């Protein structure tokens, strides 16, 4: 059930938390979601290492409507090269006003997923594209 | 990073995050402000004027997009939605990971303020197993349908597994 109509709800949720409780709470929301909701994913990354990380993101983005993503496995890292970000595609489609901090959830959550599973996380972004890199420590 | 394929899971988690940090009143405020007024803005902004047409546009689109097993019927004066298998609750039940105590209550959470503002009454029941119904009528008309009266055999209340005693019931203030 990968319904594109949920993307505006994700953004509305971020905006609601930021405007009612402040940006620090928004970052805490992202961190705690990564720690709690994605705890099974952290466990999978911890036990399965880079192979599990590559598989997870391939399967995850395969389900996302309009995503164009290459997942590249190298010796000590996995690069998730998001050439067309489905969230930005659909938020633009629905004419949503996208705040500057929208992408900040990626390094915040990615760092939790990586560090809790014994990896390092790097992030690059620009204009509806981004790269997440999980590096074996 | 956050996508829509597992949205329902972390949407449910978000309800619990808001409840445990800020309380139930703030959770209701979230459903009204973030979901009704912003995420579902098109319906919120057009329902008072377009009435049933706006409801049909929204719920037909979401029923198809969310792959619901649902039945919709309507006239110029009412709109009725019978959900036989809710994919959202199904996601949570299948994953066996429930964070907020009553996921189903979020629908009333955003529908109640929107309908009351637009001048429509609503009545709703859900059985916590993936079946529910909503009926919307103009203010002043609170003659809710009897089972089968509007949606025939597609009325969830006629299902052999529908038990009124297990249901939560909500309706707008008269």
Image (spheres, rainbow, N blue to C red):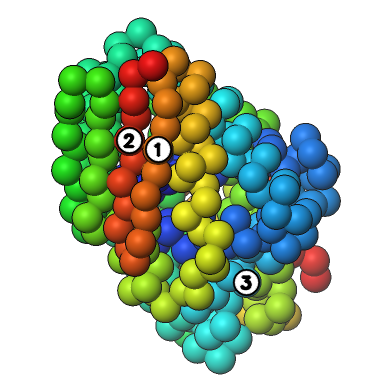
Whether residue B15 is situated above or below residue A117 in the rendered picture:
below
Q: Residue at x 66, y 49 (%)?
A: A26
* Residue B161 percent location from the top left of the image: 46, 31
**Badges 1 and 2: C-beta atoms under 8 Å apart?**
yes
Checking the image for residue A122, the label placed there is 1
Image point (40%, 12%), residue name = A46
How far apart are the alpha carbons under marks 3 and 2?
A: 36 Å
Q: Chain of mark 1?
A: A
Q: Nearer the viewer, mark 1 or mark 3?
A: 1
Chain assignment, label 3? B
Coordinates of residue A135 in the picture (x, y in percent): 34, 25
Q: Are marks 3 and 2 in contact (CB under 8 Å)?
A: no
The residue nearer to you, when weighing B163 against B12, is B12
Q: Nearer the viewer, residue B94 or B151?
A: B94
Compared to residue B4, the image places residue B97 above or below, namely above
In the image, residue B155 lies at what x, y percent?
43, 52
Marks 1/2: CA distance?
5 Å
Which residue position holds label 2? A133
Does B116 sit left or right of A11 as displayed? right
Name the residue beneath numbered marker 3: B37
Binning the other alpha carbons within 10 Å of mark 2 as few (below 14), some (14 to 19) or many (20 upward) gives: many
Q: Quadrant of residue A66?
A: bottom left
Q: Quadrant of the N terminus of chain A?
A: top left
Residues marked 3 and 2, same chain? no
Q: Which mark is residue B40?
A: none
Which SS class for mark 3?
A: helix
């Amino acid at each position: 059930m990968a319904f594109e109509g949920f993307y505006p709800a994700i953004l509305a949720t971020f905006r609601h938390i930021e405007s009612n409780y402040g940006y620090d709470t928004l970052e805490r929301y992202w961190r705690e979601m990564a720690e709690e909701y994605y705890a099974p994913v952290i466990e999978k990354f911890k036990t399965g290492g880079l192979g599990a990380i590559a598989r997870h993101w391939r399967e995850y983005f395969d389900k996302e409507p309009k995503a164009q993503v290459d997942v590249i496995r190298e010796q000590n890292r996995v690069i998730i090269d998001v050439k067309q970000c489905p969230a930005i595609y659909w938020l633009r489609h629905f004419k949503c006003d996208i705040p500057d901090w929208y992408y900040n959830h990626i390094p915040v959550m990615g760092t939790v997923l990586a560090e809790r599973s014994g990896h390092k996380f790097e992030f690059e972004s620009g204009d509806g594209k981004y790269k997440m890199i999980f590096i074996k420590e | 990073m956050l996508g829509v394929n597992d949205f329902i899971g972390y949407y449910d988690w978000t309800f619990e995050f808001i409840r445990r940090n800020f309380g139930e009143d703030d959770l209701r405020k979230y459903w009204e402000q973030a979901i009704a007024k912003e995420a579902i803005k098109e319906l919120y902004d057009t329902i008072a004027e377009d009435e049933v047409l706006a409801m049909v546009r929204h719920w037909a689109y979401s029923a198809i997009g969310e792959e619901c097993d649902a039945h919709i019927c309507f006239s110029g004066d009412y709109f009725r939605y019978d959900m036989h298998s809710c994919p959202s609750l199904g996601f949570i039940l299948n994953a066996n990971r429930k964070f907020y105590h009553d996921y189903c209550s979020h629908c009333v959470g955003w529908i109640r303020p929107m309908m009351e503002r637009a001048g429509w009454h609503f009545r709703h029941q859900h059985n916590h197993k993936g079946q529910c119904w909503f009926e919307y009528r103009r203010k002043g008309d609170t003659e809710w349908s009897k089972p089968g009266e509007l949606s025939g055999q597609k009325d969830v209340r006629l299902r052999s597994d529908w038990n009124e005693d297990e249901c939560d019931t909500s309706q707008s203030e008269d």
